[in-house]
Amino acid sequence: MDTGAGPGGQLTTGAFARTTGLSAKALRLYDSSGLLVPAQVDPHSGYRYYAPAQVDRARRIALLRQANMPLARIRVLLEASDAEAALLLGQWWAEQEDETSQRAGLVAYLRDALLERPGPTFPVQSRHAQERTLATVTARVTQHALVETIIGLRLRLREHLQHTGAIHGEEHWVLYHGVVTPDGDGPIEVCVPYEGTAAPSREVVLRVEPARQEAFVELTAAQCRYPPILHAYAAVEQWVGQHGQPDGPPREIYPVAWDDRPGAGTVAEIVRPYR
């Protein structure tokens, strides 16, 4: 029978579980992950004992897990000061709200498609794009890390070009060579157009994007979210299907620095080369 008493006033696993509301299975998981290690383990019996001072940490873990925070994020939060932890918690929750908003947009888009409801319209334009020299990096990435990866690779490309003396502006592209979803990892190709002389590296590829015809839709920052951006992609693909054949992967072109202020104008283009 588990009386709850351990050596030196410590709590047995059963007593600690009853006090904190954590199951024995959860305690084993947090022990193996290093998140909540017992204060003492009997070398002969293998029984685990917890210190009363660990109760608050365990309860905080339980609450964070109820909020569905991953163990890795919980570990970082618990190692921070209270003020830093509050900031980290707010940042994480903002990410959850953004992801929830994106999922809601996807569901709304699919419901409209199933019920054949008309969505927002986007005027599709056509142009002849000149040949461009590009510095590029290709990576496989799932949807969760897409934005962070694009920002990191764009920064790496700009630093590489600056180091070699090439000239570049704010413009960058993202080519989708495969579908990016929570389960699909692309690949994507992040590109920075440049002029002058540059050198490749083990990671950075220099190539020429040939002159081409392309259909495109201009977007504001507010339209670069779900579901508007899905309607923009659909409009471009429909236009290309009516006027020719796709001649290259779909891409997002960001011609200027990101500006989400009201009235800022175009910050991105959904583009599809065609012939």
Image: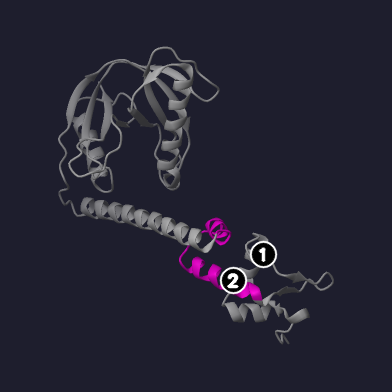
Identify the amino acid type marked 2.
Ala
State if disc 2 and disc 1 touch (CB < 8 Å): no
The verdict on residue 56 being magenta is yes
Gap in angstroms between the C-alphas marked 1 and 2: 11 Å
- Along the viewing direction, whichever of 257 and 120 lies nearer the viewer: 257
From the viewer's perspective, is 21 left or right of 150? right
Question: Magenta stretch?
Answer: 53-80
Residue closest to the eye, 166 or 106 = 166
Q: Is residue 59 above or below residue 214?
A: below
Q: Which amino acid type is shown beneath numbered disc 1?
A: Asp
In percent of width and height, residue 160 lies at 48, 23
Give the quarter of the figure containing the C terminus.
top left
Q: Is residue 134 above or below residue 91?
A: above
Which residue does the numbered mark 1 point to in the structure image?
31
Residue 207 on the magenta segment: no
Per the image, the residue denoted by label 2 is 58
